Image: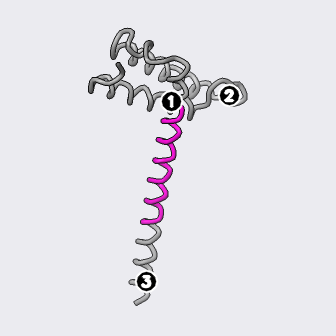
Amino acid sequence: MIEDELDNSTFEQQQTTEKMNWLMYQQIQDVCFEIAQKKSTGYGTAPLKLFGGKSILIRMNDKIARLNNIMENIDLNKLKDESIDDTLMDLINYATYLIMLRRGGIQ
């Protein structure tokens, strides 16, 4: 009996943790969406279409280089312009733009 109760408790904890993980995932995606909308208002889609997928890959490479630099020289006091999370969310958005471009979007 006690073992069954422990198994149930463990199962419920795992379910709760999984739900919380997916909730966090959705929250991150929502923030990425808001960022993309705001930046689109300022920049439009022309920079993304300039050289097709290559322009997006170049921007992604810039972000990856920035992440690498941040991770190697992690001095959080000097990170005033853009946080690690901001850079990662930009990468998520650039990956999404590339998928959209491949599917005929970003006109």
**Amino acid type of the residue tagged 2 in the rendering:** Asp
Name the quarter where the N terminus is drawn: bottom left
| Residue 66 percent coordinates (x, y) | 54, 21
The residue at the point 43 percent across, 18 percent down is: 45
Question: As shown in the figure, which amino acid type bears the numbered disc 1?
Answer: Gln
- Residue drawn at point x = 38 percent, y = 26 percent: 97
Query: Which residue is found at the position 44% from the left and 72% from the top?
Result: 12
Question: Disc number at residue 75?
Answer: 2
Q: Is residue 86 above or below residue 56?
A: below
Q: Secondary structure at mark 1?
A: helix
Q: Which secondary structure dominates the residues rendered in magenta?
A: helix
**Stretch of the chain drawn in magenta:** 15-35
Between circles 3 and 2, the one closer to the viewer is: 3
Nearer to me, 74 or 31: 31
**In this view, 83 is above or below 26:** above
Which amino acid does the dot numbered 3 rest on? Glu
Which secondary structure, mark 2? loop
Name the disc covering residue 37, or none: 1
Front disc: 2 or 1: 1
The residue lying toward the viewer, choosing from 86 and 77, is: 86
Res 56 quadrant in image: top left
Dot 1, crowdedness within 10 Å: few (<14), some or many (≥20)? few
Distance between the Cα atoms at labels 3 and 2? Answer: 47 Å
- In this rendering, the answer to whether 22 lies above or below 28 is below
